[in-house]
Image (cartoon, helix red, strand yellow):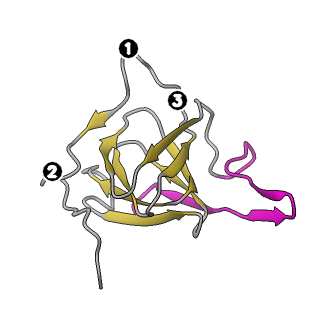
Amino acid sequence: MIDGVKIKKLKVIPDERGRLMEMLRSDDDLFIKFGQVYMTTAYPGVVKGWHYHKKQIDNMVVVRGMMKIVLYDSRKDSPTYKEVNEFFMGVHNPMLLQIPKYVYHGFKCITDYEAICINIPTEPYNYSEPDEFRVDPHSPEIPYCWDRKDR
């Protein structure tokens, strides 16, 4: 796994009224600090990426559908430099994915309906100076192909 990436398996607690799933608690080992909470979605087959942050750490949970979240370590001083990780997250695999600074990430909806992701970054969004640095999702700069892999 890419250096600094952390995952937390999430527990869904169902009963006859519905279900509950805690995502991130201030007493979790991986909790750093709170910036904001926001929702992002993707339609079937849509890829959103690549981008990285210089200040914020992301904590992502897919709460509807399934997403393939992919990370690429471009940090030259990292022991996992140029490593790629794939995470299949959502209703069939509930987990929180913590993405460190300077690690490129993107996602693709892999269900046939809109997937919803909740992100709890450590920093609030700065509208005048966004901490977001983008690369085209199909750029050869990152050695990854978003196509489905039929093995």
What crowding class fits label 2: few (fewer than 14 Cα within 10 Å), some (14-19), or many (20 or more)?
A: few
User: Would you identify the image quadrant in which residue 150 lies?
Assistant: bottom left
Q: Identify residue for label 2.
A: 139
x then y, percent, for residue 104: 32, 48
Image quadrant for the N terminus?
bottom left
Specify whether 51 is left or right of 114: left
65 and 33: which is toward the camera: 65
Q: CA distance from mark 3 to mark 2?
A: 27 Å
103 displayed left or right of 94: left
* Magenta-colored stretch includes residue 17: yes
Q: Up-down: is 149 above or below 103?
A: below
Nearer to us of marks 3 and 1 is: 1
* Amino acid residing under circle 1: Ser
Question: Which residue ends up furthest to the left in the rendered image?
Answer: 140
Q: Which residues are magenta?
A: 1-29
Q: Check disc 1 and report the residue beneath it.
A: 128
Q: Secondary structure at mark 3?
A: loop
- Mark 3 or mark 1, which has the lower sequence index? 3
- Residue 73 placement (x, y as % from top left): 31, 55
**Quarter occupied by the C terminus:** bottom left
